[in-house]
Amino acid sequence: MPPNLALKAMNIAHRGLLRATGGKLGNSFSGMPSLELTTIGRKSGRPHTVMLTSPLVDGDTIVVVASRGGGQAHPAWYLNLRDRPEVDVSFRSGPRQRMTARTATAEERAELWPKVTAKYDVYAAYQQGTTREIPLVLLTPTVIPGRRPQQ
């Protein structure tokens, strides 16, 4: 598992590549579309942004994997959205969209995990290297009463 410093450096480099190329490069990584996820810190109350990839997109639902490189601890972004599920997402350098995050249920994970690992076997290796169950997170557009969902 990469150390925290390496993970942070990869995020900074990825965001820098997107900005430097106006989103022309960096919209996918290892064959997966990338996204910028902004959560609110569960302790600090401040926004925190991280670059992630999505191994599956199903309609309006974006699936992300809280793998943290197969580490024993959940990533901070996952702990943040678990406590505060309202997040902002920029998918493939698109406009920011308010979304609601939730951990996939056991049934949903049982259906989705084989699809994820069939396409991206790195996640199977991550799971084998840790004792925790790596969560799948489902991001869906937030529906505000009286308003149409963002497109």
Image (cartoon, rainbow, N blue to C red):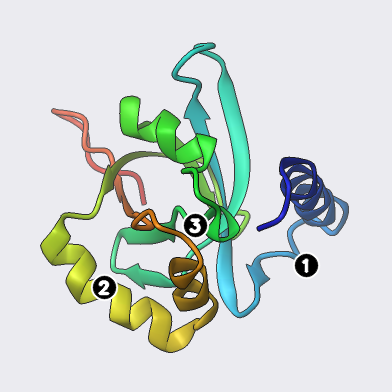
Q: Position of residue 110 (x, y in %)?
A: 19, 71
The spot of residue 14 in percent (x, y) is 77, 54
Residue 66 visible within the image: yes
Judging by the rendered image, the residue that carries numbered circle 1 is 25
- Type of amino acid under label 3: Ser
Q: Which residue is mark 3?
A: 67
- Looking at this view, name the residue that lies furthest to the right: 20
Q: Residue furthest top?
A: 44
Q: Which of the two discs, 2 and 1, sits closer to the camera? A: 2
Left/right of residue 60 with respect to residue 47 in the rendered view: left
Earlier residue among tags 2 and 1: 1
Image quarter (top left, top right, bottom left or bottom right) of the N terminus: bottom right
Residue at 88% x, 53% y is 20
Are dots 2 and 1 in contact, CB under 8 Å?
A: no
Q: CA distance from mark 3 to mark 2?
A: 15 Å
The answer to whether residue 85 shows anywhere in this view is: no
Front-most of residues 71 and 78: 71
**Picture coordinates of residue 6 (x, y %)?**
79, 49
Q: Using a 10 Å C-alpha cutoff, classify the residue at mark 1 as few (fewer than 14 neighbours), some (14 to 19) or many (20 or more).
A: some
Question: Amino acid type of disc 1?
Answer: Leu
**Residue ranking furthest to the bottom:** 118
Choose between 16 and 148: the one closer to the eye.
16
Q: Considering the numbered disc 3 on the image, is that residue within a helix, a strand or a loop?
A: loop
Q: According to the image, label 2 marks what residue?
A: 112
First-in-chain label (3 vs 2) = 3
Which residue lies at the image location 42% right of the left edge and 33% below the top edge?
79
**Could you say which quadrant of the image residue 18 lies in?**
bottom right
| Element type at mark 2 | helix
Q: Amino acid at mark 2?
A: Leu
| Whole-percent x, y for residue 58 in the image | 29, 70
